[in-house]
Image (cartoon, coloured by chain):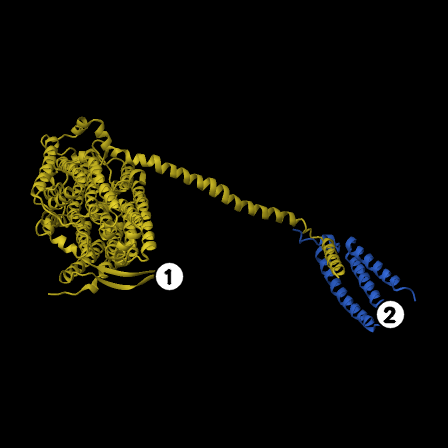
Amino acid sequence: MQINLFGLAPWVVFFPLLGLVINLLVGKTLGEKFSGGIASLAVGASFVVSVLLALSLAGDPQMHYVRLGDWITAGPLSVGWVFRVDTLAVTMMLVVSGVGTLIHVYSIGYMHHDVRHNGDPGRYTRFFVYLNLFIAAMMVLVSADNFLMMFVGWEGVGLCSYLLIGFWFEKGADGIGNARAAKKAFIVNRIGDFGLLIALFLIFATFGSLQYDEVFAKVMQISAINSPVIVLITLFMLLAVTGKSAQVPLYVWLPDAMAGPTPVSALIHAATMVTAGVYLVTRSNPLYSAAPAAQAVVAWVGAATALFAATIAVAQADIKKVLAYSTISQLGYMVAAVGMGAYAAGMFHLVTHSFFKALLFLAAGSVILGMEHGEDATQHAAQRRAGKGSKKQQQARAKEQFVQGALVFDAEHDEQFDPQDMWNMGGLRERQPVTFWVYLIGALALAGIFPLSGFFSKDEILGEAFRLQPGIFWVLLVAAFLTAFYIGRQVCLVFLGKPRTEGASRSRENPSVILVPLVILAALAAFGGAINLPGVQSLEHWLEHTIANLEPGQFSLLLAGGALLVAGMGLLVAWAVYGQAPLAKAQPDPLRRALGPLYIALEHKWWVDELYDRIIVRPYKGLAAFLSSGVDMGVIDYLGDALARLTASLADALRRLQTGLVRMYALAFLFGAVVVLAFLAFSR
Amino acid sequence: MVPISWYIGLSITLFTLGVMGILTRRNAIIIFMSLELMFNAANLAFVTFALYYHALSGQIFVFFVMAVAAAEVAVGLALMVAIFRTKGSIDVDQVSSLKG
């Protein structure tokens, strides 16, 4: 049965836009349930449209497009608002809207608690406005038919990332930490955007058009006459990819972005925005196929990032930071895959990763909620024991809590209680069982254990790597071991053993609005491998309609078994160190003694942030200070001031002429008359 | 007849005296008198040319000058009266409010 609903394509963008406009206008007055409901409905509708588009494509897999109108027509440049429906775009749409809907529903419950915890219930609606704006922008990105429209979406998701990371802009370290993290994300992304812009300029200059098909049709012909420019284009695009998809060297914003609320981390920084870079490379595959040198660079950047981030994740103490570095590492896998030309493998991992990483982040959010609840309960208990304390003490405590946000004072030990610190957790398996089981599924999927989705997607990447670039294969294999290790470490520290703080011991399971999306995501993470099983390769065949130079995936039992063994070893080592003899609060990380100075380096993220601060940020700030006070105020303002002063002194001098004496004026008349007469008399 | 330059010389002298009067005297009435002197110097020049070049228009123009001068003095003296009412004196040096 042939369904032909391609005309619906713009609605993937319009539904979220509609949702956000409604929320802007009436959301706050109509209450939390309305805001959350409308936003989730909007994204849900977008998902339905994506499904319909997918079904339409199933019958007729050629590229279709829906043209809404012209945007720019200036000389040779002609760019329009054109929505492209092909298998690649629809895959991305399904992931974004599907996972997005689940996260919206989850956020209804999560933000209800979070706005109260942070003391500003009125901000609830704003969160959903931003989330819908993000979905709209991401949809524009993936459904664009030309590079410029894609860039609009690219910038839009960057903006939403900024808005959402800094959602609690007055909170964080020193009352400015979140705002600083948001600024960092935006600025680092901007560097990537610069790369993309240069690439777009080069594309237009070389190909005369920004429309995908027109550019890709000419690639062969251009690469015959001028192949270095294609290498340049692809390398500048790589800069954009390192920014958006958090690769080395521009990944530094992603761990800081964990300052945003957990649903934001799940949606934007795990499942969708960060995959935009991988999508860009996949979409531009004809360009990359014509520049093998650039492909190699992309692949190695991905592999290096995968390993580098995995090492850092091993020594982190914050539950979300581990997941952040894990995301960077897994993105490295995807980038390495598409860099090698294995686009289907990369996209497969993109899809499965969005499932299990969103699951992990949301489940971590559930854990954090439980910890916060436990801490509140502890404080109430302590207050009841100690008496309320004076009004002043209560007010001071309340004010402190408001500023510090997520950090809550531990009434017992009078130190800062971080509900995200894994060393404060432990034994949550009994307190939050559903969360434990879904988290376990997500963790095993991430580690790549058969038969969960992560196993198939990671194995396909490893298989391709072994066949195409063995060097990359070994790097990714080591990263796989570390992946299994750090996620095993996390599961053991958070869920096994006994609670290490009183707050953890009082945590409790969350309501269904939080748990149901988790369970759905767990099912997807568990069974998601079915979209591209070896032999059947459904996703690959689906994507072949769009991507010309797809490397066909080949399944090797030996390789799969070997990778499974490596992952299993990682989990085993983690269990041996952290799970077998669960640690009490005061005990240090056993890895600290085992690795010594290496552990310090890992804990400090290899001091990359400090390095950037030293060699880039400080000189830049110095330059900015010099230009601002030295050049701008010193020279330019000085010139303006000097001009004004000159005019004033001139006026002052001329003022002397105005004596007010009539006789002076009469003299002036006489003088003028003499001059005119003399002129008349002598000019004849 | 005497050479025309004598008459013109006289006219110039009278005019210069009038200018000096305007520039140096402080009393407004004296300034008006000097102004009248200047007018009459011009009148003398007109009449001289009318006589020596047989051009009647010079004589006619003198009437115009006298009429305008009279009107102007009327206005000027009225101004002086108004100023005297405000300032109590007609010393032109005191009319210097426009001093910048």
The three-letter amino acid code for the residue at tag 2 is Leu
| Displayed quadrant of residue A361 | top left
Chain colored yellow: A
Of A585 and A604, the residue lying toward us:
A604
Kindly identify which numbered label has been placed on residue B51: 2
Residue occupying image coordinates x 25% and y 44%: A293
Q: Position of residue A358 (x, y in %)?
A: 17, 46
Chain B tint in image:
blue
Of A411 and A503, the residue lying toward us:
A503
Mark 2, Cα crowd under 10 Å, few <14 / some 14-19 / many 20+, is some
Kindly identify which numbered label has been placed on residue A410: none
Q: Secondary structure at mark 2?
A: helix
| Displayed quadrant of residue A43 | bottom left
The three-letter amino acid code for the residue at tag 1 is Gly
The verdict on a common chain for dots 1 and 2 is no
Q: Chain of mark 1?
A: A
Residue occupying image coordinates x 80% and y 55%: B20
B84 relative to A449, above or below: below
Q: Position of residue A574 (x, y in %)?
A: 12, 33
A61 left or right, relative to A612: left
A588 relative to A684, above or below: above
Q: Position of residue B63 (x, y in %)?
A: 80, 71
Numbered disc in front, either 1 or 2 = 1
A538 left or right, relative to A130: left
Residue at the extreme bottom: B56
Kindly identify which numbered label has been placed on residue A75: 1
Q: Is residue A430 visible?
A: no
Of A82 and A283, the residue lying toward us:
A283
Q: Secondary structure at mark 1?
A: loop
Q: Position of residue A317 (x, y in %)?
A: 20, 35
For the C terminus of chain A, the image quarter is bottom right
Residue at the extreme right: B1
